[in-house]
Amino acid sequence: MKNILLFGAPGAGKGTQSKKIILKYGLVHLSTGDILRSEIARNTELGKEARTYMVKGELVPDNIVIEMIEQKIKNQSNSKGFVFDGFPRTVAQAKSLDDLLNKNNTEISFLLALLVETDELKKRMQIRASKENRTDDTPDVIENRIKVYKEKTAPVADYYKKQNKYITVSGMGSVEEIFAGVSKVIDKIFI
Ligand code: B4P
């Protein structure tokens, strides 16, 4: 299986690039952010709990997201592989994902980090706020999400560096320019 972990700060373009990767390479998209927003929209118990964290820009507890991902992987076990978008966001989630994939006789192929300057991240999320009305795209919450990213999520990169699975690509420029860089990396590894 081809399992790509798309990594980056909030607003780095993980969702945007994931959608293009799955179309080109026939992989399954697993975005914990999208799954959580869908739970919120359906007003499920999980959604109600997740919302209390997301509106503050905090991470949803590990046990909730790990269970969600486990279900999704089980349901799609015959796929060619996954693009993990926004997961893992903590080292505990990364360890659980490795265990889960090992149980299915597969592993993360590589982590692809989208590198974007902080001012550009803020600009993109402010633009998204006006288009999508996301409750976590207000200035205060954006600041907190970037802080949480540095404290809790950035160490995930070190975890995969130790496994020699860490690759970077520029996340600056147009969506198509970035996707050209992303495709180059994927083609080099898989073809
Ligand atoms: P996510 O849904 O993962 O949101 P994100 O990190 O903000 O977005 P992403 O990087 O995907 O950016 P996008 O492509 O949309 O998470 C939301 C929240 O859910 C988290 O804060 C957390 O509370 C919770 N959560 C999710 N996963 C979790 C986990 N594993 N554990 C715990 N909690 C979890 O791009 C951003 C904007 O920029 C878009 O409007 C896009 O159109 C624009 N854009 C993209 N590329 C561009 C480019 N090249 N140029 C200009 N604009 C661009």
Image (cartoon, grey):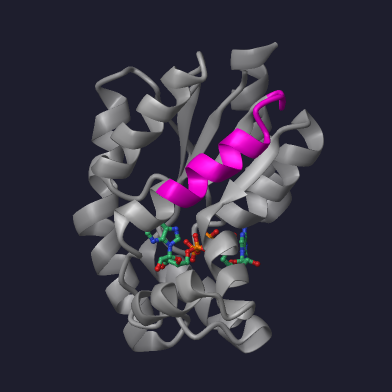
Looking at the image, residue 169 lies above or below residue 40: above
Q: Position of residue 165 (x, y in %)?
A: 39, 22
Q: What is the magenta segment's predominant secondary structure?
A: helix
102 relative to 178 in the view: left or right: left
Quarter of image, res 29:
top right
41 in magenta: no
- Spot the residue most to the left: 151
Residue placed most toward the observer, 124 or 69: 69
- Residue at 32 percent across and 28 percent down: it is 160
Q: Position of residue 55 (x, y in %)?
A: 40, 82
Q: Position of residue 69 (x, y in %)?
A: 50, 45
- Residue at 65 percent across and 55 percent down: it is 16
Q: Position of residue 166 (x, y in %)?
A: 38, 27
- Residue at 43 percent across and 48 percent down: it is 67
145 relative to 116 in the view: left or right: left
Region rendered in magenta: 67-80
- Residue at 36 percent across and 26 percent down: it is 99
